[in-house]
Amino acid sequence: MKAKATWVIAAAYACAWVAPQAWGRDWYVSAARGAGKTGTAEKPVKDLGSIVSRLGDGDRVFIAEGTYLGRGDNGCDQIDKAVEIYGGFADDFSKRDPWGVHKTILSGSNTTKNWVQGYRLSIDLGKRRDLRARHKVVVDGLIVDHGDRNRYADKTDSKIVRMADPKTGKNPTPEYGGISVAVTKLGDIVVRNCVVLNTASSGNGAISVWGSEKSEVTVENNIACNNTGYGFYLHTAFYPDELERMPQFKFSHNVAAFSSKPDPGATHGGSGLKVDAATRVTAEWNVLAFGDYYGVDNASQAKRFVLNNNLFVVNLQGDYLEFDTKMKVADIEDDSDKLEEATGNVASDKLRPKVSREWAQKYLSRQVVDRNAKEADVKAVQSGANELRSILGLPLEGTSVGEYSDVWLPRIGIDDALVCGNKPVLEKYGSKDPGQSEPIK
């Protein structure tokens, strides 16, 4: 018989912790105390990867503080069940503080013999045909850091290397983001209170979510900091003609900061938020900052898109892209053809994230190639570089366009990533620390 555990929690998290479906059970994971396969609070397992094959639809997983490397240090948990995963607990599961003293960190090892290419956490129900009733996937309170999964050029961790080195046993840098969730018909998704950093996607999101027919998708209070590709990518796996059948996304109070192109010369990626065509999206109260390309990439033109009350900060090519038209915040409401609403959005070039000076200096040492200038063989000052330097509190200087850079996706620390979103910007934009909560026994 499957074990059961019933939790009653503080009101602050009551909306996120719903009763499991009738056939589910609760699992507990602890890096410090875990052993075996029992998976109770008294006898937790050691790693989420240890129980992936044992999970069933409706199961909930509670993960204590610590760093988790996956099964055999493979750095990649791939799940095909409708589960709910919550991190950020004390080791005895009595308290929760996911961005504070009880961080649950999913990472990996670049030199593992069991290296697996993929998202650090993937929950993919896209091939399931047996899920006929409404179901839900929740990912809440995880920190995903690819720093130890990546291969860097040297010990300074200033530049990723995408290829493996068989001579030294070093694996390639994974070309995927940190969290991916995909559901099938009538599947709902909640991604909340998660932080993803140092992922080197070649074209997807640090956090990617895939809705399907009539999906309700909530992405709120997350941070995507220092990633290539896109900070957040809202996908659809379903392309109906009827608007009401398209997946519906609520994207609110998130921070996408320092979103880079996959490599210096790439012509894609480098945006805080990207959306697919057959989607209904409401994006409000987000911070979209320091993108190599755009704050919001709507080149695919979402079917219904509301973009209200968002803060844009120094995106090098434009704040908003609609098909092939680049816009500044001041022009969005008048010039957009595909936005249902676009009110209250603001831009600022005065806000400074409190990242360390050391990391900021590395980041501004990158050479971001302007493809047009590159093809014309023109050397020019990097567009926006001095604006970024000013915001980050660094001396102003010129930066030449170049095909190669000695710095690309310099590794950022978790504390630096958290300061980009652990409190609202200007008291209302972006994410905030979810704080502490205590289960009531």
Image (cartoon, helix red, strand yellow):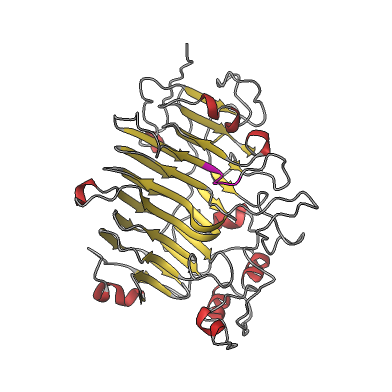
- Above or below residue 214? Residue 19 is above
* Numbered range of the magenta stretch: 117-121
Image position of 345 (left or right of 93)? left
Residue at 80%, 53% in the rendered image: 167
Q: Residue at x 35, y 66 (%)?
A: 299
The front one of 238 and 216 is 238
The residue at the point 32 percent across, 50 percent down is: 249
Where residue 206 appears, x then y in whole percent? 50, 53
Q: Residue at x 63, y 44 (%)?
A: 107
Side (left or right) of 197 relative to 128: right
**Residue furthest top in the image:** 1
Name the one closer to the observer, 291 or 117. Answer: 117
Q: Note whether 171 is above or below 161 in the view shown.
A: above
State the image coordinates of residue 284 (x, y, percent, origin top left). Answer: 33, 58
Q: Quadrant of residue 418?
A: bottom right
Would residue 89 appear left or right of 166 to someone viewing this image?
left
Inspect the magenta stretch and tell me whether residue 120 lies in it: yes
Residue 286 x/y as whole percent: 39, 59
* Residue 371 vertical placement versus 225 (above, below): below
Q: Position of residue 142 (x, y in %)?
A: 53, 42
Q: Main secondary structure of the magenta part?
A: loop
